[in-house]
Image (cartoon, helix red, strand yellow):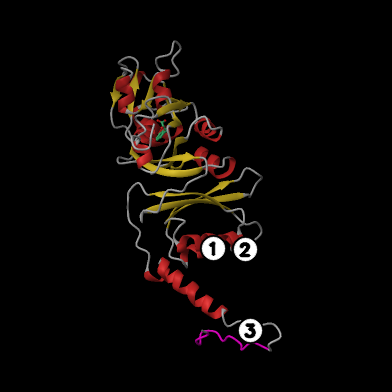
Amino acid sequence: MSPSVNPAAQSGLDAQTYSFLGPSGTFTEAALLQVPGAEQATRVPAGSVLTALNMVESGEVDAAMVPIENSVEGGVTATLDAISVAHQLHILREELVPISFVLAAASPLTPAQIRSVSTHTHGWAQVRRWAESAIPGAEFVPASSTAAAARGLLEETPVADAAVCSPLVAEQLGLHVIQHGIEDVTGAVTRFVLVSRPGIIPAMTGADKTTIMIPLPQDRAGALMELLEHFATRGVNLCRIESRPTGDGLGQYYFSIDLEGHIDEARVSDALAGIHRIAPGIRFLGSYPRADRKPQQPAAEVSDEAFTAAAAWISSLETRVREPGAGPAPRRSRGVGAG
Ligand SMILES: O=C(O)C(=O)Cc1ccccc1
């Protein structure tokens, strides 16, 4: 497909093949279909987030869509850990999908007849209060996705009496909807990310996010505060920060952080360079446009112009460094017009 006919290429993504947390009918597939050109591209369902990511790493597909954050439950730990620690992948794009659930069954059951319910763990976490009052005592049967749970009802030996899934997949599979809108929090949104092998970073738009991973420096009092100061002093706003175990032993943690801004902005690259000095294991996981398109308005003192002017000022000082053996250089006094 030539870039001129591929809307994905026109939007800066030239992926032709995508993997996603499947099967067909997941919220993740809905997120992928929001990507320009994905509808015309090859889409390969994967049985788990890890499988979807492995397919990218092995080169089987160009990019993978996976869930990363939920407005009710927080981070999707399987995704955070996989892209932060195990894989060498970069985020190209994010998508937001509003989430609403139905309780569905293969036959018209009443809530009282339901003894087991299957869904994805994040789905279950978002309907738990409803389930406690409407189907108390029903056993939760974990599934790899909401759509897999729905399909499991149609197997010869059904996985459960009912499934929690999207209204769309219930309709596509011809299931009976026992109850609509069963989510505990209305207006919940899940954030999905499109990841690919490291390569081109999407261009800065002025409304961008950057994702990084920072291993917490060991045996260093105030390490977290030191890290955060690098952001605070450069006016870099954080929009997500989570600590996760590295898997290397008790007490070993990393921070997964989303910040407002693009790596091409001086305040962002300067903050990350500062952090690299105290946490050299820091990993850059991508700069990409914000799904909500909310523009950044950095203060004048942390604008690129202010950094350029500051660097020019330092260079002007460096031109006055004396040759060795030319005698002692005049002492630079602090704050009184050193240059
Ligand atoms: O299982 C799905 O359909 C998914 O895409 C993962 C998920 C599960 C629950 C809420 C949001 C995403």
Mark 2–mark 3 CB contact (< 8 Å): no
- The Cα atoms of the two marked residues, 1 and 3, are separated by 38 Å
Please identify, in this view, whether the residue under mark 2 or under mark 3 is nearer the observer.
3
SS label for mark 3: loop
Given residues 230 and 198, the one toward you in this image is 198
* Type of secondary structure dominating the magenta stretch: loop
Residue at which label 3 appears? 322
Which residue in the structure is indicated by mark 1? 225
Which residue in the protein does label 2 denote? 221
Work out how far the residue at label 2 is from the one at label 3, CA to CA, in angstroms.
39 Å
Q: How far across and down, in percent of the image, does residue 65 sit?
A: 43, 36
Q: Is residue 202 left or right of residue 134?
A: right
- Tell me: residue 275, above or below residue 94: below
SS label for mark 2: loop
- Residue furthest out toward the top: 156
Residue at figure coordinates x 47%, y 34% from the top left: 62
Q: In whole angstroms, how far apart are the C-alphas of marks 1 and 2? A: 9 Å
Circle 3 Cα neighbour tier, 10 Å, few/some/many (<14 / 14–19 / ≥20)? few
